[in-house]
Image (cartoon, rainbow, N blue to C red):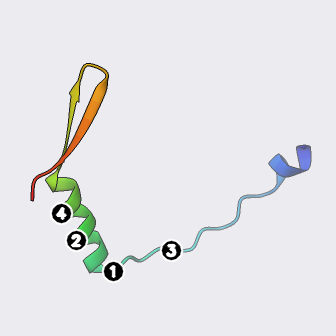
Amino acid sequence: MAKIYSKKATVTKDLKPKKEVVSFILSYSEALTIVKIDDKSFEIMAN
């Protein structure tokens, strides 16, 4: 078990997402609304 946790973390590569992907994620997050009522949550898309 000690060997698993003592390994060095691998170096992450620089991620360069496309502008289209970033734009999609931002527009999705702007349109998403989460409403919490009591112990339930509802996700509403405003499209």
Task: Give x and y (percent) for residue 30.
Answer: 16, 54
Amino acid type, residue under disc 4 in the picture: Ser
Q: Secondary structure at mark 1?
A: loop
Which tag is nearer the camera, tag 4 or tag 1? 4
Instruction: Judge the density around disc 3: few (<14), some (14-19), many (≥20) Cα neighbours within 10 Å.
Output: few
Sequence-wise, which precedes: disc 3 or disc 4? 3
Q: Which mark is residue 18?
A: 1
List the residue tagged with mark 3. Answer: 14
Amino acid type, residue under disc 3 in the picture: Asp
For the residues labelled 3 and 1, the Cα–Cα distance comes to: 13 Å
List the residue tagged with mark 2. Answer: 23
Dots 2, 4 in contact, CB < 8 A: yes
Q: How many marks?
A: 4
Q: Secondary structure at mark 4?
A: helix
Q: Secondary structure at mark 2?
A: helix
Amino acid type, residue under disc 1 in the picture: Lys
Q: Secondary structure at mark 3?
A: loop
Dots 3, 4 in contact, CB < 8 A: no
Instruction: Judge the density around disc 1: few (<14), some (14-19), many (≥20) Cα neighbours within 10 Å.
Output: few
Which tag is nearer the camera, tag 3 or tag 1? 1
Sequence-wise, which precedes: disc 2 or disc 1? 1
Instruction: Judge the density around disc 2: few (<14), some (14-19), many (≥20) Cα neighbours within 10 Å.
Output: few
- Residue at (81%, 47%) from the top-left corner? 5
Q: Nearer the viewer, residue 11 or 26?
A: 26
Q: Which mark is residue 10?
A: none
Q: Nearer the viewer, residue 30 or 17?
A: 30
List the residue tagged with mark 4. Answer: 27
Task: Give x and y (percent) for residue 13.
Answer: 57, 74
For the residues labelled 4 and 1, the Cα–Cα distance comes to: 15 Å
